[in-house]
Amino acid sequence: MATPIIYGTEMSTYVRTARLAFEEKPAQYELVDVSVVRGEVKSPAHLARNPFGTVPTFEHDGFKFYETGAIIRYIDQVWPGTTLTPEDARDRARMNQIISIIDYYAYDAIIRRIVVHRLLPQLIGGADPAVIAAAIPRAKLCLAEFDRIKGGGKFLAGDQLSLADLYLAPVLFYLALTPEAPLLAEHARLAAWWEMMQQRSSYKKTQPRLS
């Protein structure tokens, strides 16, 4: 079986989620850098892989597709090793719920409106404090929901590591680098989970180089 390829920058939270899935299996993969900062996501070569110009895109034995949710579920189904989807239907529903919250609400508030304005203002022509301030209530709501949904389980969707954990950890990595990092400390269960995730080998192996 050919080595699967992830196209995308290691700085991307979504690329890191796909990499985390392989590291947790564990299974070999290749990361082919496609830089967002340098505009390579809009190059003809990358648009041929993904006409929306986003990352990651994925290739395995001639099968090519994009969208992180599809990629990580494919990884979990095709590669043997650690199962990243709960067997219990309710835990699986919670996993999918958390993934959807990130895709539809948390990524926009935390990454696009807080992290990018704080850490990568050059990509948007300069930071706008009003955008950051407006995003904080939504970010706080998302964190509160993650904490509530997690409940007393060890991981976000029960006592088994799941795709939900691999989705959220890269987002919190960047939030922790901003002045808004104390928002996480308001939620004890989520904060304890975050400390635990940072100790995992997969997390350490996929930490992006920011300089």
Image (cartoon, rainbow, N blue to C red):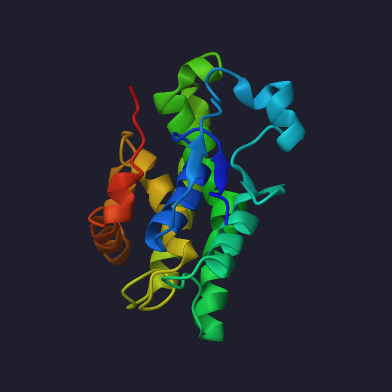
Residue at (56%, 58%) from the top-left corner?
Answer: 72
Q: Is residue 154 left or right of residue 149?
A: left
Between 50 and 146, the one lying in front of the other is: 50
Between 107 and 14, the one lying in front of the other is: 14
Q: Is residue 71 visible?
A: yes
* Residue 134, percent from left and from top: 52, 37
Q: Is residue 134 visible?
A: no
Q: Quadrant of the C terminus?
A: top left
* Residue 23, percent from left and from top: 39, 55
Q: Is residue 54 left or right of residue 167?
A: right
* Residue at the limit of the structure toward the front, as seen here: 1
Between 26 and 37, the one lying in front of the other is: 26
Residue at (36%, 70%) from the top-left corner?
Answer: 155
Quadrant of residue 108 in the image? top right
Q: Is residue 159 left or right of residue 86?
A: left
Q: Quadrant of the N terminus?
A: bottom right
Residue at (35%, 27%) from the top-left corner?
Answer: 210
* Residue 42, percent from left and from top: 68, 23
Examine the rendered structure and indicate whether residue 210 appears above or below residue 160.
above
* Residue 164, percent from left and from top: 47, 63
